[in-house]
Structure formats: C-alpha cells, structure tokens
Image (cartoon, grey):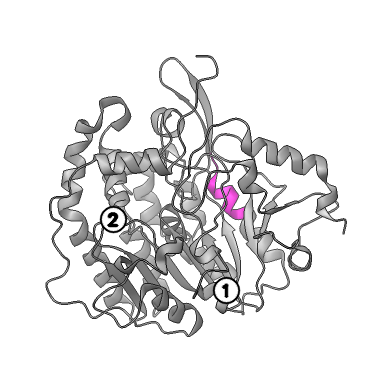
Amino acid sequence: MKSTTSAITLTSIWLAAQTSAFSLSEAGDESTGPSAENLADYEICENTGDQDCNYAYLKENLPEGKKSWIVAPDSNTVCLDGSPFGFLVFPGTTDRVMLWFQGGGACYDYETCVAAPTALTRFSPNSEGYFNYDLEGNPLASGGWTSIVNNCCSGDMFIGDATRELTNGTHTETVHFAGYNNTLAVLNWMQAQSEFPVDQEIASGGCSAGSLGVQVWADYLVRNYGVDKLQPDSYIGMLPREAGDTMLQWNACGPAKAQYLEQDIVDLCEAGGLHEMPPVFNDFLAKNPEFPVAYTGSAHDIVQRGYYALLTSQIYTCGVMEYLPGFAEVSLTFSDYLWTALTGYNEADVNYSYYIVDTTQHSFVVKDDIVSNEAVNSPYSDLTMWEYVGKFLNEDEYQNSPSYPAELPPTLALDIDPTKFYDYIKQHQTVHYQEQDA
C-alpha cells in the first residue's frame, strides 16, 4: 500500500474543507471545533484506490505525537453542511474494540441547522475523557482498547437519510441528514478488518446524541458486529411529541426498519408518533436478555431538558421566554422519567446498571475532569464514576449501581431557568455564520 501521507492533494482538500467555510467556537462537550491547528494533532488517511486505510497500516504508521487517525471514507458520506465526513481510529494494544458514537446535538429546521446550529455541522474530533489516552485511570488506555469513533456531524442522531432544502423565507440552504450512511461507512470499514472478528470483545457506547444513536443501533450492532456490552452516557431519550415530526424530517423510519426494529415501532415512526427511546430500548432488551449495559448521567441534565424544550418551542425566533413553558415542564418531570426508565431497564435486565449523580451536568466520560471533579462521583457508591466504567469495561462487573436511598430521585430545586441551556448552546455548539449573500 502507498503511504497516505503522499496523498497531499486529497488530504489538503479535506483539511481545507473542514476549516474554511464556517466560523466555529468550541463544539460540544467532546472536542474543540475543527480548526486547522486542532486537526493538525491528527493524521489523516484518505481511502483511495491506492490506500484502503486498513487497520494494520494505521496501527503501524501513526506518526509520533499524533493523537489518532482520521479516516476519510470513499463511500457515500457527508456532514450536515456538505463538508467531508470522517471517523477516528485510536489504535490499541489488545484485540479489544470500543465503537463510540460521538455526541454533537441535533437539528431539524433552518433556525436549528443553519442560522444558529444546535448540532455539529462538520467533523470535529474527540480529545478528552476516553479519548485522552494519557488521562489518569482511562479504562480504554489501561485496557488496551482500540477506539473507533463514529463522529457526529449530521444533526440526526445517526439515523437520518435525507437531503433537505431549508429556508427562513429569505435564504435557503441545503443540508444533509446523512447519519445512517455515515454510520454504515464506519461499520463497513470495521467489518472489513481481519483484526475485529465478531467473536472478540467489542463494546459500543455513545454520549449525548451518541447515547441515543447507540441505543437505536444496538440490536444491529449485536447481530452483525458481535458487540457484547453498551455504555451510553447522558441521554435517556425523553423527548416531546413534536420529536416524532423530526424523525420524519430526517427520513429516519426506513433506517429504523433496517436496524431490526419491530414493525410496530417502524409504523409508529411513520405515523410521527415515535418520540422517546424506551419503546426502542425495551425491545432491544427483550431480544437480548441479560445484556450488559452501564448508563452514566445526572439526575437533572441541563442539556436533555434543554433539547426537550427546544422541540416544543421556537427558541431562536420567539426568544427565551417562549422557551420557558417547555423547560419548566421537563424540569419538573425529567428526574422521575429518568428514574422510571433506568429502574425499568434494570428489572428487565439484571446486567443493566446505572451511575447517576445529583447535578445538572451533561456528559461525563468524554471530559477530562471526570478524574478531578468530585461532583461526578456518587456518595452512594464506593466507586468513582471513572472506576465504575472501568470495572464494567475491563473486569466485566455488570451490577455496580450505587446503593441509592429510597427517596431518590431527588427534587430539582429552583432550576427552571432556560437561559442556562441557551448559554450552553452559544458556548459549546457551532456558532452561527454570516450569510454569504447578506
């Protein structure tokens, strides 16, 4: 095989496409925006006729000082804004594999996808938590795991299959809800590697939108790729009825059927009625009894509550006060919903465990402060959250939920201010860019 570093033209084009068109701030909890400086920490492998970016090549040729590979597939993949899709590969030292679904928000119309995006619109790498292999106590590093990150850049929870023309009445933009094909490209690459047979240890997980993505794809991953444990972080799947229309906007019902979801769930989706995760994941647990799952999260997650309210209002056109009723509603009901879902999953599956802390934080295992922030550790457990996921992944301990008191879930006190989520979007997601023809 020819070295990918010789493909200067293709790589330069890919890099330029990532860094030119939009002005980006820090993008999501997992990474910074794809600036040229940021992408310089990674080595890019273009999948071409001369180079298929096989794992053996990647493992032997990662240059010193680079964090991981970015693989740019040659298949039908694209990010929301039309820029190139890519996925990360962190070579490990054992035959263990972690397939991770990156977080990165979601969107559905001109306001949320274009004017002031509530989702990553282009590739952005992970660099913290699990994906900082130098981080103290990192279970992926200590366990020798190879990590494959299905990067989030299509705003559709990894299940969209549609190109849409979105307009605000004055400007029109083409967006690509391509999460389904992007995910298949990652899975096809993984399946083609002789180092990753289905009978070896393969885990999968995801944070935020990736938590939802891995739960939807779970049965498909188990059947076809030998995934034998799941680690979703920070999205249980409580969404308002309006989310059913978003599934139709993404054209997600066909992909849902292809992922082995039952026909009644597909029918519900096609009728615009699929708007929460428990029907999907309960179906998975029924088909896969005693399957190991370790959920991590907070009892009052600000982002999960925020996205619920976002779908019930038009925050960007009506302002924060119009957003308040939905936010107040979900703030009073979210922790009960979360607890009902988690305890129900545990009743259905003895190997379903959860580690919940009494905070508003969103996402944990993709942040470096999981090592030092005491607020991410439950007072009802002898294990820190970092130790909890470590024992789940590396020691096959599947029943380490903290010993919560009977009065849980706790009551959320004086936290129904929607500006917190609004500020989160402005600070952590892609910032809106100038209209080209303004």
Which amino acid type corresponds to the residue marked 2 in the rendered image? Asp
**Could you say which disc has been placed on residue 301 in the image?**
2
Secondary structure beneath dot 1 equals: helix
Above or below: residue 213 compared with residue 358: above
| Magenta residue check for 168 | no
Q: Which segment did they paint magenta?
A: 177-184
Residue 32 percent location from the top left of the image: 52, 47
Using the image as rendered, state which of residue 351 and residue 35 is in the foreground: 35
- Residue 12 lies in what quarter of the image? top right
| Residue 323 visible, this orientation | yes
Q: Is residue 372 left or right of residue 122?
A: left
Return the residue at label 1. 141
Q: Disc 2 versus disc 1: distance between alpha carbons?
A: 28 Å
Q: Residue at x 28, y 55 (%)?
A: 301
Residue 59 percent location from the top left of the image: 74, 68
Using the image as rendered, state which of residue 182 and residue 348 is in the foreground: 182
Above or below: residue 258 compared with residue 18: below
| Residue 272 visible, this orientation | no
Q: Residue at x 39, y 68 (%)?
A: 372
Q: Residues within 10 Å of mark 1 (few under 14, many from 20)?
A: many
Which amino acid type corresponds to the residue marked 1 in the rendered image? Ala
| Magenta residue check for 180 | yes
Q: Residue at x 19, y 50 (%)?
A: 331
